[in-house]
Image (tube, coloured by chain):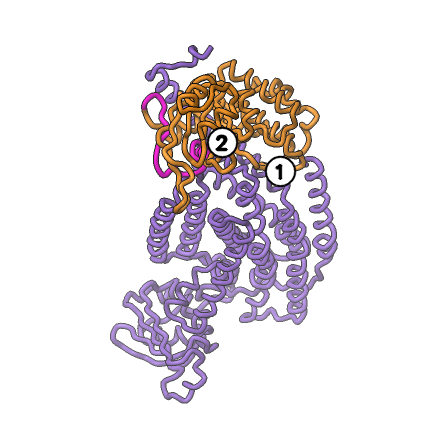
Chain colours: A purple, B orange
Amino acid sequence: MRSRERLTAENAKNAAEEDLSALAALAPVAFGWLLRKETRELLASRAWWVLLVAMGPLVGVTFIGAVRTYAEASGLGGTAAGVGEAFSPLVGIWAPTFGACEVAAVFLLPFVAIRIVAGDRQSGAAKIEMQHAMPAIGHVGAKAAVLFAAWIVASLPAAIAVVLWKSYGGSIYPPELATVASGHVLNAGLTIALAALTAAISEHPSTAAILTLSVTVGTWILNFIAAVQGGIWERAASYTPPAMVAAFQHGLVRLDVVLIAMVLIASGLSLAAAWMRTGVAVRRRLNESFALAALAAAAVLTCTFATPSWDASESRANSFPEPDEEALAQIRTPLRIEAHLAPEDPRRSDLERKAISKLRRVMPKVDVQYISSTSIGLFEQTSPHYGEIWYELGGRREMSRSTTAEGVLETIYLLAGVKAREEGGDAIFRGHPLAVPPKGAAAIFYGIWPALALGCAFLTRWRYA
Amino acid sequence: MLHVRNLTKRYGRFTALSDVSFSIRPGEVLGLIGPNGSGKTTLFECLGGVLPLDAGSLMHEGRPLSDRERATTLFYLPDAIVPWPAQPVRWAIDFMLGFFAGRAHLRDEVIERFDLLPLIDVAMGSLSKGQRKRALLAIGLLMPQPLLLADEPFDGLDLRQTRDVAQTLRSYASAGRTIVLSIHQIRDAARVCDRFVLLSGGRGRGEGTLEELSAMAAARGAGASHDLEEVFLALT
């Protein structure tokens, strides 16, 4: 019997090659099994069911509040041009409603992700599963795919809110709705990648949770520093998840932000795979991690040069009126703006939000410099130059103190010698006022959804365990 | 089949394994014998690819095994794990069969041999230590790799179960399966293994059949004995 097992060297080599090719052919099947396993592990996890149950009330409280506020504002009858933005469902309904998804992505989703990624290590299943010839990225990919699908399911209450809004007679502009939803999907992707990474590098899930929340708090601190210091901090803060979500919530799709988010997701999952592998020395993992981090940093830096952006909002909230954009497009010479405003001065954020951010989208050759000697600007008010905004175009300089879009455009047109055509009345966004109460929403989000989720939890756990 | 050459593993300044070498022959049940802390689990984890080696190699037909070849050659069944605690035994077995493209034709036979039918719908996490050990051994035998490394396969089993499991392992070995067992209970090892590797203090102290080890012990001045315990004590 034993002699039959003895193979010649050639036979053994051939057998090994056959084994390897058979293994490659079986890879999709094995990945399918991993997906099934991760799905079952997700369904067996309490964290997932808590997320699912909580999503109903979370979305409910924001949606109901938003609809009520929208209705109250609409009841005032302000449908005149100029206040139309106040009645955009993008700002009035979708931003707050989907804001619940942001809360869940920050405070609940990481625990689900950590449970799925760290669970195998805790139970010892990783020692068995990682013996498969499948690369570690395959294991991480299966977990990420299931977590991603789980997030889509958990976002169903937001989809229900859309249906409810439509049933109330509310207006839906699909591009802006899709933009908001995409922002939250990307944000969830970032959370999953981060949680996977922290779960892979830490010995215990609680450490992973602390690390994940630390990174989240770190991005908040970065945003705070950016608000105080401005400059490079401001630039860096614009790529943090909260800033990214905020841009999407305003209907703005920036290619650089999307690319950077995707690079960060891919890097996070790749690093997680590097640390999930068994049988690899720590020094080698560290070297690989540094190389991967350097590669990711280079990719992120490259992505910052991708300037295209798209305004998906119906109200063109991120754009100047079309005639102004046409006029600005005629200006070929670089524009330099020097604003003497401190980072915490509200006029600076007004200028940035209402004019500069829109200007950057139309005029790629615009260089903006903020000058101040303090962060709050309170004690600079007496300085004769504080509050001045200097514009330089083709060697000509002009100063203005206006921080409105109209004021900024007027100065630029004066310098460039161009004039925008008159905008037709039809082009002005009048808004979509809707004065209806959120009928039935409370029952759905506070009653039916949690009951359904709990029912599914009990049924699933009864069936699988 | 396989040769372990000069395997060394250090944890910082502590050397857990030092220049351990031995051979694994096709179709045999090889017992890795050693007291607690002798390095058995570390050795298995190094062979199974769970821990990185500091030195040494696993040779197959004169050349070192690559990671992918190792994945198709051996399967390591760790001790003291509770994998997929929420999933029933049936699903754990089917998952492993599907994931590793295991020996599905043996599924029902192995389940019966390890008396798992009454436990088939019980969650892995709800099993007793011995029940879980039987479920995991069943999974190990269903794996497609020709070599199975099982760490402490009798840990948690009662006397009758130990005897039954030993018989089952022997029967699969006699059908061509190669099995390496790490055992700290020498009597259990004597019952099931064809050959032995003695490990103590992270060093290999001897390799061979009971007769060969006995001769080795006698050559070192110990009295002639065919008791594995006596031989082990004489050589370590």
Residue placed under numbered mark 1 in the picture: B85
Task: Name the residue nearer the viewer: A104 or A303.
Answer: A104
Residue A204 within the segment the image draws in magenta: no
Q: Disc 2: which chain?
A: B
What amino acid does circle 2 point to?
Gly
How many neighbours does mark 1 have within 10 angstroms: few (below 14), some (14-19), or many (20 or more)?
Answer: many
| SS under mark 1 | loop
- How many residues crowd mark 2 within 10 Å: few (<14), some (14–19), many (20+)? many
Kindly indicate whether the residues beneath marks 1 and 2 are on one polypeptide chain.
Answer: yes
**Would residue A49 be found to the left or right of residue B217 on screen?**
right
Frontmost residue, A377 versus B222: B222
Indicate the quadrant containing the N terminus of chain B: top left, top right, bottom left or bottom right.
Answer: top left
Question: Closest to the observer: A345 or B217?
Answer: B217
Q: Which residue is mark 2?
A: B34
Q: Is residue B157 above or below residue B106?
A: below
* Nearer-N-terminus badge (1/2): 2
Look at the image and give the residue range highlighted in magenta. B43-62
Q: In the depicted view, which residue is nearer to us: B227 or A433?
A: B227
